[in-house]
Image (spheres, rainbow, N blue to C red):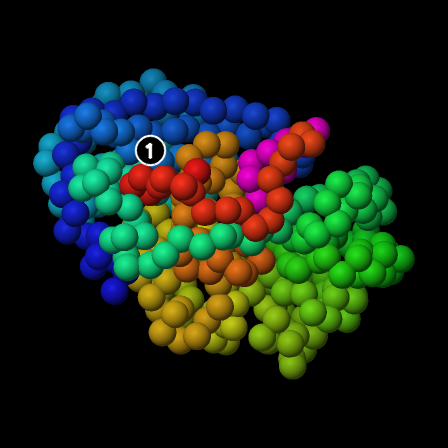
Amino acid sequence: MGYDAVADLDVEVEGYDLHRRESETSSGFTRVTTVVSLHGRGETGRGEDVTYDNDAHDALQSTSGEFPLAGAYELEDFSTRLSALDLFLGDEPDQSAFRNYRRWAFESAALDLALKQAETTLADRLGREYRPVRFVVSTRLDEPPTGDRVLDWLDRDRDLEFKLDPTPDWSAEVIARLADTDAVRVLDLKGQYHGTSVVQPADPDLYRQVVDGFPDALIEDPALTDETRPIFEGHEERVTWDYPIRSVESVEKLPWEPAWLNVKPSRFGSVRALFDTLDHCEERGIQLFGGGQFELDVGREHLHAVASLFYPDAPNDVAPSGYNEPEPRDDLPASPLGTPADPRGFEWS
């Protein structure tokens, strides 16, 4: 299966360094990430820490060289080594998920390095083929919401598709206007982001309007209560889950066996957890699409690589990073993204 194909890869780590990335976003916040680069045998493997805490990235910069990672491993052994380290050096992150985000940066870098040292690619190792990646654009509406932002995007590229975050101030007119575009593929209710600044409480009125107004779209992360659960009866196959999904066990704990899931590799923390979940879903016919975390660097490539191998034709929320900039450029690539001409390791560019 997937993980078995990479677990025994040899990887030699001689050292590492960290690089801070920063960018303003169309969602109105400053995104900071850290690129982790592992070096060995003349190769470099890279991963990206997508922790949503800028101070945590600043603190990480001061730890460069402090993690005892040098050595010769199999990939599985390197993962075990990471399990024994506190990558936050005694500081408790604001969210438990951040530990997975940081660990994924090191694990994905090690996978990239191991593949390069073996002179192979993830596709070759898995016995799969890279295919063009369909993507949707995730964007917030203007304030107050009118739908103009989506229509402006469609003026640039009439074939774009979208993932949107409905809020209680969406009027019936805005919902109808957006539905008329026939371009909305996923609607994220943010009902599962417990303990974060973006969580939205259960809103039966909003849920009914979204379910009825977009009959062909996927509905993501509703907050299920005695009042909202009946709204989704008969629509279970349209419900997809994102924030809770970080292992096979998390999939099995969902309210019902899902028809769709949003896969964000960084949520899983380890290569094993990701690939075991991909196998689990494939065996059960659960459809998948990819999700992003405002990556600024190689982390976005990794999303594209996984999507390309496992769910290339899905409504993947993995648009190139330029789509998240406050003022998008005119030269942004269109969907689907073409396959890389000469991929190496875990790279997909």
Q: Name the residue located 57 percent from the left edge and 44 percent from the top edge.
A: 319
Q: Label 1 neighbourhood size at 10 Å, few (<14), some (14-19), many (20+)?
A: many
Report the front residue among 324 and 104: 324
> Is residue 347 left or right of 179 when viewed as pictured?
left
Q: Name the residue located 15 percent from the left edge and 51 percent from the top edge.
A: 8
Q: Quadrant of the C terminus?
A: top left
Q: Name the residue located 50 percent from the left edge and 46 percent from the top edge.
A: 338
Q: Position of residue 35 (x, y in %)?
A: 39, 29
Q: Quadrant of the N terminus?
A: bottom left
Q: Position of residue 120 (x, y in %)?
A: 24, 44
Report the front residue among 173 and 315: 315
Which of the 4 image quadrants contains residue 60?
top left
What residue type is disc 1 on?
Arg
Q: Name the residue located 45 percent from the left edge and 47 percent from the top edge.
A: 339
> Is residue 195 left or right of 277 when viewed as pictured?
right
Q: Name the residue beneath numbered marker 1.
A: 46
Q: Residue furthest top?
A: 62
Q: Position of residue 283 (x, y in %)?
A: 36, 74
For the record, the magenta segment spans 318-328
Q: Residue furthest bottom?
A: 234
